[in-house]
């Protein structure tokens, strides 16, 4: 049974999470299950996704994140396992800090496959199911503060995340008539296994903390909370939004003197 906003009213959401083996994806799966939602976790990391699934009693589906048709099959399998789908989230991605002149074509294509192709395939597969069901739903992607401001050595990431922002805006317009909402959450630096090279270095961590006006980097739960809100019934009148959850990085500049005061 669905409510007036096209959600699985009264029974919690049925959520497919692509990239659920990572820090943000796994945090989202645990948070969603803790709030009574049904979850299917999808990832190319078979061992890790099965571990996450066992922790939160979720269906687990192994796929290749950059595999266009594989993601479509995976989201279809998730919908079958849960008896439908109300929300889909794509957290898949890789991390590369290099200037453009040192970035190889293979590295750039790897970033685009893991992030842009995965995001596009998620929107394509989830929107089809939500349209066919006639009940609408919510799709949320993961962008980055790097798509909004210039950050050193973030060229490849900025290209990918900028593409995701454009995808959100166009898809939100296309699927609004079907009550399918499309949004993105844009973090700053978050402490996950993927960013351990930075967060595990004391000097790099201190510099990163100083870049964020709130004086710390993000935790996976900071982002998971925002994602879960964006696909919830509480956000049923929100679409086409890129929600910054970045400690003020992309919008606030605090003078050094004010930081010391």
Image (spheres, helix red, strand yellow):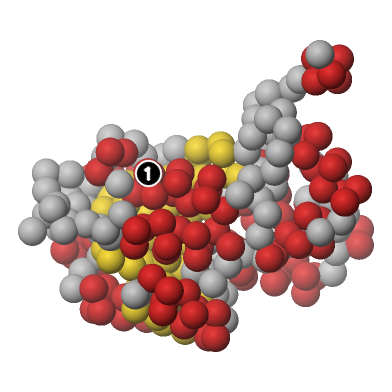
Q: How many marks?
A: 1
- For this rendering, which residue is in front, 228 or 140? 228
Image quarter of the C terminus: top right
Relative placement, left or right, of 180 versus 244 is: left
Relative placement, left or right, of 138 versus 224 is: left
Which percent across, then down, holds residue 235?
31, 39
Q: Residue at x 82, y 48 (%)?
A: 205
Q: Residue at x 45, y 58 (%)?
A: 28
Please tell me whether residue 146 is drawn above or below residue 260 in the rendered image: below
Relative placement, left or right, of 136 versus 1 is: right
Q: Is residue 100 visible?
A: no
Residue receiving disc 1: 229
Which percent across, then down, holds residue 224?
48, 51
- For this rendering, which residue is in front, 230 or 191? 191
- For this rendering, which residue is in front, 76 or 14? 14
Q: Residue at x 71, y 39 (%)?
A: 216
Please tell me whether residue 113 is drawn above or below residue 249 in the rendered image: below
Q: Secondary structure at mark 1?
A: helix
Name, please, the residue furthest toward the left.
1
Relative placement, left or right, of 66 versus 206 is: left
Picture quadrant of residue 197 = bottom right
Q: Residue at x 54, y 45 (%)?
A: 222
Which percent across, then down, holds residue 219?
61, 49
Picture quadrant of residue 250 = top right
**Residue count near mark 1 (Cα–Cα under 10 Å), binned few <14, some 14–19, many ≥20:** few
Image quarter of the N terminus: bottom left
Please tell me whether residue 49 is drawn above or below residue 148 in the rendered image: below
Q: Is residue 198 visible?
A: yes
């Amino acid at each position: 049974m669905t409510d007036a906003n096209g959600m699985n009213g009264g029974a919690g959401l049925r959520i497919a999470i692509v990239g659920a083996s990572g820090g943000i994806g796994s945090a989202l799966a645990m948070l969603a299950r803790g709030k009574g939602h049904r979850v299917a976790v999808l990832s190319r990391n078979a061992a890790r996704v099965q571990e996450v699934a066992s922790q939160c009693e979720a269906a687990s589906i192994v796929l290749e994140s950059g595999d266009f048709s594989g993601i479509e099959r995976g989201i279809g399998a998730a919908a079958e396992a849960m008896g439908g789908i109300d929300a889909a989230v794509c957290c898949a991605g890789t991390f590369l800090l290099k200037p453009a002149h040192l970035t190889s074509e293979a590295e750039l294509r790897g970033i685009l496959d893991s992030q842009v192709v995965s995001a596009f395939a998620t929107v394509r597969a989830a929107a089809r199911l939500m349209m066919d069901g006639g009940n609408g739903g919510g799709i949320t992607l993961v962008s980055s503060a790097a798509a909004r401001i210039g950050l050193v050595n973030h060229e490849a990431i900025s290209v990918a995340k900028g593409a995701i922002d454009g995808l959100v805006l166009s898809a939100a317009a296309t699927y609004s008539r079907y009550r399918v909402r499309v949004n993105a959450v844009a973090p700053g630096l978050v402490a996950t296994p993927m960013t351990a090279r930075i967060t595990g270095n004391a000097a790099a961590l201190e510099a990163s903390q100083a870049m964020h006006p709130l004086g710390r980097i993000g935790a996976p739960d900071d982002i998971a909370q925002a994602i879960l809100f964006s696909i919830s019934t509480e956000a049923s009148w929100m679409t086409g939004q890129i929600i910054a959850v970045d400690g003020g990085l992309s919008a606030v500049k605090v003078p050094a003197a004010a930081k010391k005061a």
